[in-house]
Every structure is written in C-alpha cells, then in structure tokens.
Image: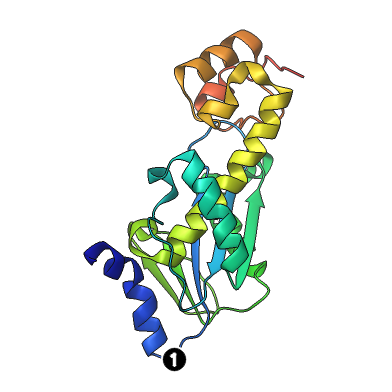
C-alpha cells in the first residue's frame, strides 16, 4: 500500500486544493544516438487506478504495450511532443527535451490546472511541480512515461525496417556495442544525431 499511496501523493494533494485537471509530463530518448526525443503529457481521471504502473523503464515491453492501451482508453487527454534529431543537433538535447515537453502540453485538448513534471523545470503560464524521480512517485508522470516510451519505440521499429543492420528494434537507438559497430561498418543514416560523438566521428560515412 505504501507504494500505491506514494504514487498518488502529489495528485491527491492537488485534488484537495480544488485542482481538476492535473497533467503528468515525461520524456524519453535523451540518450539514444538516433531518432527523436518524445514527450507525453497525460491527464488522468481522478479515480484512475492501474496496478503496477510505474516508470516505463521498469516495465517489460509487453506490460508497457498493455498499459499504453489502457491509458489511451481511460485518459481524459493525451498530448505528444516529438522533436526531430535535426532539431536536437541545432539546439542541444536539453533544450530539445524542453521543447518536446511544451509541445506535448500544448497538444492536450484540455488546459491543465497544474502540471507535474519529471525533474525538468519548465517556464509556463500554468503552475508546475518538478519532481525528482517523478516517474516513480506520480501516477500521472508514470502514465506519461509509458505513452512517451511506447510512442518512440514504435517510431524506432519503423526506422529498423529501413535500416535493420543497426538492431534498433532491440537497442531503441542507444549506443550499444552492436549499434556502434554497425555505425563504423555501414556509416550513419539520416536519422542519426550528428551532435552525438559516436555519430559525429563517422559523419563522413552516409548510409542512404
């Protein structure tokens, strides 16, 4: 029960203050060498429960996919923000992450009364709370974490069909040994992030 209570703590406090629409915001894809950074903003109904929902990184792929469908069906509103690898190269991953989060919030079809954010501070005209390890401590941020993760994974599966030699369906774009060896052997794709060292070091080898 302690984990369950902790997971709802921030939301319960805000509901008690009369806040109706509370958005959890999280991102995925800051570390990978390829593909976009994706953020999600999720407003859950006050009575929402989903046993086992936590940080998406701690869930199996099968469970993430199942939770993704449940959240999509039951959420009051979901917003997605996707910032391309080219934009990441232009402004750096930290700024791109903020852009993705703001885009996700703006893509909600209901304006939230309060926003709970995993760690990242945002300058908005809506009250926010930035929570360290928020994807573990807030059910709304956990939901956003799952939506962002599954959304990005599905994008990587499509890139993997185009470039199977990088093993993206398994590494999701992170700099695994197999991924880096493939970059050295085959070069880089149009989806790789040139501002990341292992990619930049092979920027002259383009795999079209």
Helix, strand or loop for disc 1: loop
Q: Is residue 10 left or right of residue 111?
A: left
Place of residue 30 in the rendered image (x, y in percent of width and height, measured from the top left): 50, 43
Residue closer to the observer: 110 or 127: 110
Q: Residue furthest top?
A: 185
Residue 121 visible from this viewpoint: no
Figure quadrant of the C terminus? top right
Quickly name the residue at label 1: 18
Place of residue 127 in the rendered image (x, y in percent of width and height, measured from the top left): 47, 79
Q: Is residue 54 left or right of residue 69?
A: left
Q: Residue at x 56, y 59 (%)?
A: 70
Residue closer to the observer: 173 or 196: 173
Residue closer to the observer: 186 or 74: 74
> Please, is residue 194 above or below residue 45 in the view?
above
Q: Residue at x 64, y 78 (%)?
A: 110
Q: Residue at x 48, y 26 (%)?
A: 175
């Amino acid at each position: 029960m302690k984990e369950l209570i902790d997971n709802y703590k921030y939301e319960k406090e805000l509901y008690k203050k009369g806040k109706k629409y509370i958005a959890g915001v999280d991102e995925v894809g800051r570390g990978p060498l390829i593909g976009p950074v994706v953020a999600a903003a999720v407003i859950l109904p006050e009575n929402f429960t989903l046993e086992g929902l936590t940080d998406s990184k701690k869930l199996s792929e099968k469970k993430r996919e199942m939770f993704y469908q449940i959240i999509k069906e039951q959420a009051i509103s979901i917003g997605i923000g996707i910032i391309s690898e080219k934009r990441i190269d232009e402004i750096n991953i930290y700024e791109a992450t903020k852009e993705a989060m703001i885009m996700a919030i703006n893509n909600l079809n209901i304006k939230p009364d309060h926003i709970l954010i995993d760690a990242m501070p945002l300058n908005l005209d809506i009250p926010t709370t930035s929570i360290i390890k928020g994807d573990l401590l807030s059910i709304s941020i956990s939901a956003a974490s799952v939506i962002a993760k599954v959304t990005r994974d599905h994008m990587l599966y499509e890139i993997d069909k185009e470039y199977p030699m990088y093993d993206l369906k398994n590494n999701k774009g992170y700099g695994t040994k197999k991924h880096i060896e493939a970059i050295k052997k085959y070069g880089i794709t149009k989806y790789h992030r040139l501002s990341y060292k292992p990619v930049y070091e092979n920027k002259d080898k383009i795999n079209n």
